[in-house]
Amino acid sequence: MIRLSALIVLLIVTGSSIKLYAQMNKGYVVTNDGEQVEVYFDEEGFSDNPDRVSYRTSPEGEAITGSMEDIAAFWLPGKFKYIRQEVLMDRPEDPRSGISKTREPQFNSETLFLKVVLEGEATLYSYKEGRLLRFFYRVNDGAINQLVYKKYMGTVIIRGAEEDQLKVNESFKQQIQSELVCEDITANTIKNTSYRRSSLTNVFKAYNTCKGAESVSWHDRKTLTKNLKFSVRLGLSRGRLLMPRNVANLSTPGFPRRLFSSGPTESDLQTVPTLALEFEYLQPLKKAGTLSFFLETEIQSVSGELPRSILVEDSPTTFTYDFTFFTVMIGGRYYLPEYKKFSPFVDLGLGFVFASDEIELIGNSQTASPYVVSSNPIRTGIGITFDQRFDLTLKRVEDRGSENETYDYTGISLGYKF
């Protein structure tokens, strides 16, 4: 039988990998004084362009939040690079639809962290904020300008009457034609270029190749893993083992086919340690917190003796148990927006429990090992995270509809998110 104490070793081994994991997120920050500082980022990427970034000066150090007031640039090699820049940007008059009433861009000066998409003699940048997506460019050491793409409602004459019609200002094609002069970038190439990262990247890469310059791509293709987190949790659970009237089918040769009690039997309340490993995928919601989906595996062992006898073939028999419960829980979690590094959350999950043990019927002199049961409990939980790394969770797990043994419990755990 697998004991919980043996799996504690897994926690120790996993904990020793914290430094190795942090090394994978080792990057750089450039201060306003031009000093380049080696740091460790908490994030591997951003769904939208950030206005601040969290980092540490050492793997185990305290998290520092850097903003546009004190950071000129930051990057994680092979993942992302952002530079602070004051630029003229056009925003749609209707942010929800992304549509304006006028064709010409209405530029306003903004200081932003621009994401470097492709770096070279001609560099391509992007800025994403919800549904808003804008691309910028710089040739050599020139100014950074927006590539103009604007949806607007224009007026057309149909059958002698004026009607509004959706139109698109694609001035970015003229900008490419005048700024990226290269024989490999033909009129047909420009015509077929769309206002998308991949399409624009191909054009800028072609220009750099034409000029004999190297192109460095900063696009992180691992979009599915940048929001994937791994957590380890240690905790305590307090609950009781419930034996239904018709306890279980046993397949061990020579062992009674069924155990019968005079009614449902519950064990005494007991407190046991727990160990849980969790994978979680985070999906940030713009200014509305974060939604996540998790897959958690938890292990705990309970043992004891039922407070009263049960009947086996009409003979009273004492029932002792020593269960090891493996729970695989899948569910969803919602985090409220972070406030001073704290973020409360609620979660709901459905579990798949597999329990194996060695049971003994004293007075009947028979033992079954292994003895396997399963159930599908429901989990409800609340908790709070700190610094996007530590979490404290209070949960209730119970299954009242199972015909097998169930261990209903209330648990509390402390976790660390990698």
Image (cartoon, rainbow, N blue to C red):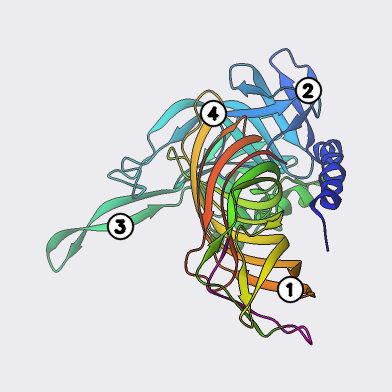
Please tell me which residue lies in front, 125 or 29: 29
* Circle 4: element type: strand
Residue at image point 69% right, 53% down: 225
- Pointer 3 with pointer 1, Cβ within 8 A: no
Q: Earlier in the sequence, mark 4 or mark 1?
A: 4
Quadrant (top left, top right, bottom left, bottom right) of the N terminus: bottom right
Q: Quadrant of residue 224?
A: bottom right
Report x, y in % for residue 168.
38, 54
The circle drawn on residue 166 is 3
Which label sits in the foreground, 3 or 4?
A: 4
**Of the residues under marks 2 and 4, which one precedes in the sequence?**
2
Residue beneath label 2, please? 57
Write down the quadrant of residue 248 in the picture: bottom right
Is 216 covered by the magenta stretch? no
Between the C-alphas of marks 3 and 2, the distance is 50 Å
At x 53%, y 23%, the residue is 340
Work out whether residue 5 or residue 199 is closer to the camera in this orientation and state it: 5
Within-10-Å neighbours for mark 4: few <14, some 14–19, many 20+: some
In this view, 418 is above or below 311: above
Q: What residue type is labelled 3?
A: Leu
Residue type indicated by callout 1:
Tyr
Q: Mark 1 points at which residue?
A: 371
Label 2 to label 4: alpha-carbon separation? 21 Å
- Classify mark 3: residues with Cα within 10 Å, few (<14), some (14-19) or many (20+): few
Where 88 falls versus 244 (above or below)? above
Residue 253: in magenta span = yes
Q: Nearer the viewer, mark 2 or mark 4?
A: 4
